[in-house]
Image: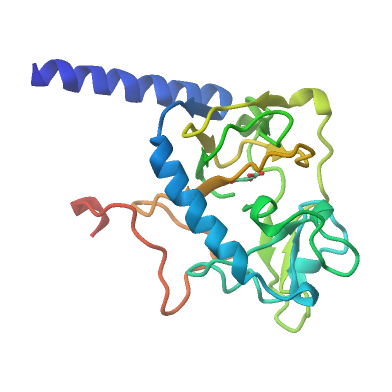
Amino acid sequence: MFNCLLENRCKMYESIREKLDTDGYVVMEEFLWPEECDELSDAGLEFTTELPDADQRTVFSTTDAMNKHAKDTYFFESNDKIRPFFEEAALNADGSLKVPANVSLNKPTPPIGFWIALEDATVQNGCLWIAAGSHKSGVHRRMLRNPDTESKELMIYDKPAPIYPESSFTAVPVSKGSCIILHGHVVHKSAVNKSDKPRPAYTFHVIEKYNNQYAPENWLQEGENAPFQNLYTTMQMM
Ligand SMILES: O=C(O)CCC(=O)C(=O)O
């Protein structure tokens, strides 16, 4: 009985691994119970009551040449903090939100991403769009710490923004509680939510510490007093 369970589990891991290798992402339905999604959503909603003032809001853009957020330390210090940022289209010119905070917060990517839908994510409310297989051509662009420590630009890109044809992306709508596992190199995006339904998601990213060198030029680094948290600890990680 135990052997059989173990065998089934191994088969499941293998098929997840194969799909991740082929497409760069895997959808795992019913990853969380609806109650767990609600608990996470509530925690997120509570957080939206404590946003930075309008004149201090940071926009996240992977293509904006002005690259505003690279100019401050906001993200530099974010490895052990929750640092909200805003999609470009989410703010008016004066920094006020176009839609209430509880439906406009979001988050960014490294080696394996876990993206969990806390409500149904549809094409209308801004599900993920993924360029399946794009991870096979490696990293297309990196955001790095600026080696020029005199510069006011704390972070820089190593290349101009690539242009991807819309046809490379496939919408990946998922139901509440599903988890999309993302290969860290797979190109993905989400569109502006033009519906009247929020699209909360809980996302985190995991790197392998064992036998793996985390690049010292990556924009996000462990803080002196804030090491990256271990997801699990085994002998191999000691
Ligand atoms: O939720 C989104 O719209 C994008 C999130 C994302 O890029 C990620 O978690 O890797």
- On the image, which quarter does residue 87 sit in? bottom right
Quadrant in which the C terminus appears? bottom left
Quadrant in which the N terminus appears? top left
Identify which residue, 36 or 131, lies in the foreground: 36
Which colour style is shown?
rainbow
Which residue, as the protein is rendered here, is positioned at the far bottom?
150
| Quadrant position of ligand 1 | top right
Residue 206 in view: no
Identify which residue, 204 or 19, lies in the foreground: 204
**Residue at coordinates 55% horizontally, 49% vertically from top-left?**
110
Left or right of 159 on screen, residue 218 = left
Residue 101 x/y as whole percent? 69, 58
Picture layout, residue 113 above or below residue 93: above
Residue 103 x/y as whole percent? 67, 50
Identify which residue, 217 or 15, lies in the foreground: 15
Residue 164 x/y as whole percent? 81, 34
